[in-house]
Each structure stands twice: as structure tokens, then as C-alpha cells.
Image (cartoon, rainbow, N blue to C red):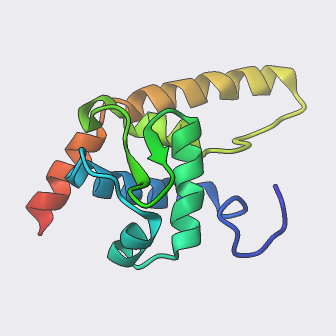
Amino acid sequence: MGSCCGSFFSMAQSGRFQLSVRVLTVLAGAPDAMHTSAVIAEELGESAVMVRRAFLLLHKAGLIEQRKGPNGGAKLKIPAKQIGLGDVFVATEGEWMTLDDTAVAAMMKKVRGDAVAAMNEHSLAGVVKRMKKAK
């Protein structure tokens, strides 16, 4: 990973994951509307640059679609109930864990798979529902 301080890509995986979940919850709140990074950033109290970088990872993972231009922005590509938290984790994880020991690396790959499967038991729609209850 790069050493560019303050960069979304050098941010700890947990920070990228957390911001991406927050961005997705905003998109899920009005799934048919296009949302600009500036509006989302203001709503979340984040920088628009960080939100755009989250958009890049989420788009690459197929979770959102983006459009440029005056009516541009981003929106969910698939329904929130079909987006698992494990999907978001995978989209934001970067280099999760590289190990030289192949036996340990194989075991950690299985552990990662089990963790992603467990996270996918919880959907973005469930997160949105819990956030609405908490308000």
C-alpha cells in the first residue's frame, strides 16, 4: 500500500469499509435517485474526495453505477437487500493478508472466506433498517 497520508487507499481497511457502508446507506435511502459525492459528503461530514474514492471501489465491485454530467452521480446497481456486508468488505479490503508460508496462507484464505460468508448473512437493507430504528 502507498504511504500517501490521508489517502483513501492508504486508509486502514476498516476505515474504507466503514465509509463505504455509510455511502451505500445514503444511496439505499433513495435508490432510484442519482447522488453526487458532494451531497453525500455533506450529509456524512466527510470529504467529497473520500466519497468519490469510495465510489470507485464500489463501482469496480459492481455494487453501484455512476454517471457523469449535470445529472450525474451514483446509485445502487442492485437492491440493498442483495448487498451483503461481506460484499462491501471484499470491495474495500485491498491487500488483506499476504503470507509467505503457503500452509498458513491457505488456512487464512479459508478463514477469510468464512468471515465474508458470515458477513453476507447481513444485508445493507438490514443496516439501513437498524439505522432508521436508532434515530
Can residue 57 be seen from the camera position used here? yes
What x and y, as percent, mark residue 58? 51, 44
At 13% across and 65% down in the image, what residue appears?
A: 134
109 with respect to 98 (left or right) = left
Of residues 42 and 127, the one nearer the viewer is: 42
Which residue shows up at 27% across the image and 38% down it?
80
Q: Is residue 16 visible?
A: no
Give the x, y percent position of residue 130.
17, 53
Answer left or right for 76 relative to 53: left
* Quarter of the image where one finds residue 85: top left
Residue 59 in the image: x percent, y percent? 53, 41
In the orientation shown, which residue stands out farthest toward the right? 100
Splitting the image into 4 quarters, where does residue 106 fall? top right
Location of residue 87 in the rendering, given as x and y in whole percent from the top left corner: 46, 34
* 131 relative position to 14: left or right: left
Is the residue 82 above or below the residue 58 in the image? above
Identify which residue is drawn at 38% across, 31% down: 120
Q: Is residue 14 left or right of residue 32?
A: right
Q: Could you tell me how many numbered marks the image carries?
A: 0
Residue at (70, 68) in percent of width and height: 7
